[in-house]
Image (cartoon, grey):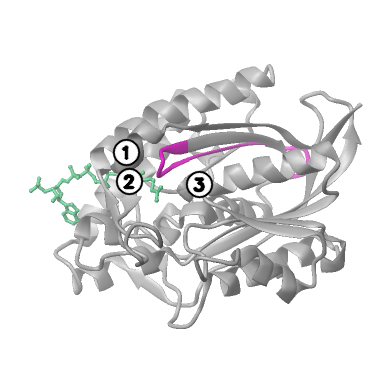
Amino acid sequence: MVKRSRILGCGSYLPANVVTNRDLEARVDTSDDWIVQRTGIRSRHIAADGELTSDLAIAAATRALEHAGVDAASIDCIVLATTTPDNTFPATATKVQAALGAKGFALDIQAVCAGFVYAMSIADNFIRLGQATRALVIGAETFSRLLDWKDRTTCVLFGDGAGAVVMEGYDAAGTAADRGVLSTHLHSDGAQYGLLYVDGGPSATGTAGHVRMNGQEVFRHAVSKLSSVVEEALAANGLEPAAVDWLVPHQANQRIIDGIARKLKLPTDKVVLTVDRHGNTSAASIPLALCEAVHDGRVKRGDLILMEAIGGGLTWGAAMVRW
Ligand code: ACO
């Protein structure tokens, strides 16, 4: 017998305001054709003035609790992955905890676009060690607040949103047939810090800063690092790619996602895609995609889900989960 974390339910939230590529044509020197061909993105949701990361997180978490059928007071751990906290401190997770009436402890984690995989891994480890029994894992971003709306090379890529899952410990057989998190795999390479970063921060400048990215280099790293981490996740569980029912990737770029699906020889109908309608929502992109596929009935009990993501740092990782 081993302790594992199974997922009881999930929920998500997207701000009402939808910004299309055509809308962006009026703001920067870009075109719908360029954005669609290079990224697959057609539109994204942008938070309203005064709508904060905590608002998105609370909405997604409330829906996840409803879907799981559990009371917020039974949650003893909240791990919130975000690059865009309401304030530099306290952790946005503590605001979410108070709003929901959850117990235990709450923390933010920062791994940019790999944030949700990191957060799930952290919560899974708390649960397996017995330090938490029922955790809320959230990815929430108002990433639009970090964009330089004059920089066409970055502002067309991102969007806002939030997704959440409820995880609970149980005694499992210890095989790949178990429900829940089978394994997580985390990596970072700080030597690549300058490839994707924000040019501000409380210590460096006293400002929030704007996203700066060497897109081509990030693309190159993404394909090779994500290919290797999905192989690592499969090998750790003694599984072949054909065992994967759903690839739920970080939604940064359709071409990166297609490249990983090709390596795994997964047909496109086994890949959950939201990048066309959400853009890159950083830590929120995986739970947003997961939720969509769960709530529209694609993901069924017992299905094997492979999640993978890469972000600034560079940070990257994968999670193998049986629904
Ligand atoms: N509209 C029109 N033209 C543009 C735009 C735009 N929005 N942006 C750039 N261009 C131009 C460039 O200026 C360049 O013009 P030039 O040839 O005259 O110099 C041309 O298009 C080609 O630019 P490239 O940067 O070479 O385009 P590329 O094919 O590499 O696509 C992209 C750029 C989409 C950013 C790609 O590199 C990419 O997706 N990279 C990975 C990004 C990523 O995955 N990030 C994930 C992590 S995000 C996180 O952690 C926060």
Instruction: Kindly state the secondary structure of the residue where label 1 is placed.
Output: helix
- Which element type, helix, strand or loop, lies under badge 3? loop
Residue that badge 2 annotates = 196
**What count of labels does the image hold?**
3
Residue 125 in picture, x, y percent from top left: 74, 38
- Beta carbon of the mark 2 residue lies under 8 A of ligand 1: yes
**Image height check: is 243 above or below 247?**
above
Task: Provide residue 24's location: percent of width, then percent of height.
Answer: 25, 69
Residue in the foreground of this view, choosing between 205 and 197: 205
Q: Is mark 3 within 8 Å of ligand 1?
A: no
Marked residue nearer the N-terminal end (2 or 1): 2
Q: 305 or 183: which is nearer to us?
A: 183
Mark 2: give few (<14), some (14-19) or many (20+) Cα within 10 Å. Answer: some
Q: Nearer the viewer, mark 2 or mark 1?
A: 2
Q: What amino acid is at disc 3?
A: Ala
Say which quadrant the C terminus sits in. Answer: top right
Residue lying at the far front in this picture: please name it: 203
Q: Residue at x 35, y 32 (%)?
A: 191
Residue found 50% across the figure and 74% down from its top? 15
